[in-house]
Image (tube, grey):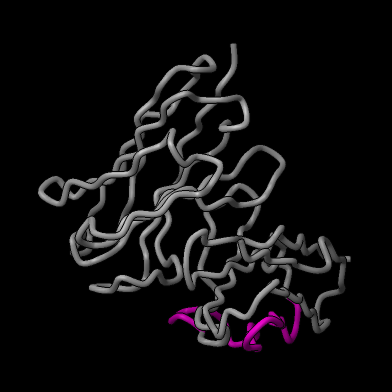
Amino acid sequence: EVQLVESGGGLVQPGRSLRLSCAASGFTFDDYAMHWVRLPPGKGLEWVSGISWDDFKIDYADSVKGRFTISRDDAENSLHLQMNSLRPDDTALYYCVKDKGGYTYGWDAFDIWGQGIMVTVSS
Amino acid sequence: DIQMTQSPSSLSASVGDRVTITCRASQGIANYLAWYQQKPGKVPKLLIYAASTLPSGVPSRFSGSGHGTDFTLTISSLQPEDVATYYCQRYNYAPLTFGGGTKVEIK
């Protein structure tokens, strides 16, 4: 069964850091690009960041550029999101998401989603 | 950045009705357009990719059309289990923008 399981969320004060992780199983992880997408309370989906199958291509939303860093560990079948200088408007449910395309440097639609992990930034 | 504008933001329709949701890109995106369904309290699900292709397992009452800047998601006969928020998303290049969402309810 294809599965993505996020961890590392929680309550954090503004300005602090948090690292999200995503454990992938049921598919050949290093064949696919991966992404983080978030859902702020009462708002719509927002793409946060994506990383290609080989780390060569990495993109960020303008709202997180310079503060967040995406990475992957293919040996551990895991995806990470290092979040620094957190702000209250980063409060959201964060989803780990699999890109449908494989061995490509273009992005594709998102075909597998994790259950999400909540991040709350508040003093 | 290319903006994605969905309309309407919400709708209420009867079971069996034909429902249409539109998504407009501020610039041409060819067919790099996906639709997602998010039921209350659930994870988003891919409904359509490449503007009109249904993944395996998606009911045939869902269809997508469009190319360039104007796209449509159609539910041919609304069912109670279709109550959800629907999002369009472009994925030609970053940022991979979502539309604002359309909340579909049963009248």
Q: Quadrant of the C terminus of chain A?
A: top right
A93 to A85, vertically: above or below: below
Image quadrant in which you'd find residue A97: bottom left
Indicate yes or no whether the magenta region holds residue A110. no
Q: Is residue B102 above or below residue B77?
A: above
Residue A44 image position (x, y, % from top left): 66, 50
**B17 left or right of A80?**
right
Q: Which residues are magenta?
A: B54-78
x and y percent of residue B33 in the render? 56, 76
Is residue B95 or residue A100 the one in the foreground? B95
In the rendered view, does A19 fall on the left or right side of B76? left
For the N terminus of chain A, the quadrant is bottom left
Residue B100 x/y as whole percent: 71, 58
Q: Quadrant of residue B104?
A: bottom right
Residue A68, placed above or below residue A86 = below
Q: Position of residue A89 (x, y in %)?
A: 62, 31
From what the image shows, is residue A99 above or below residue B68?
Answer: above
**B1 vs B82, nearest the viewer:** B1
Give the residue at x 43% y 36%.
A66
Q: Is residue B58 left or right of residue A73?
A: right
Which residue is painted at 74% across and 66% down in the image? B5
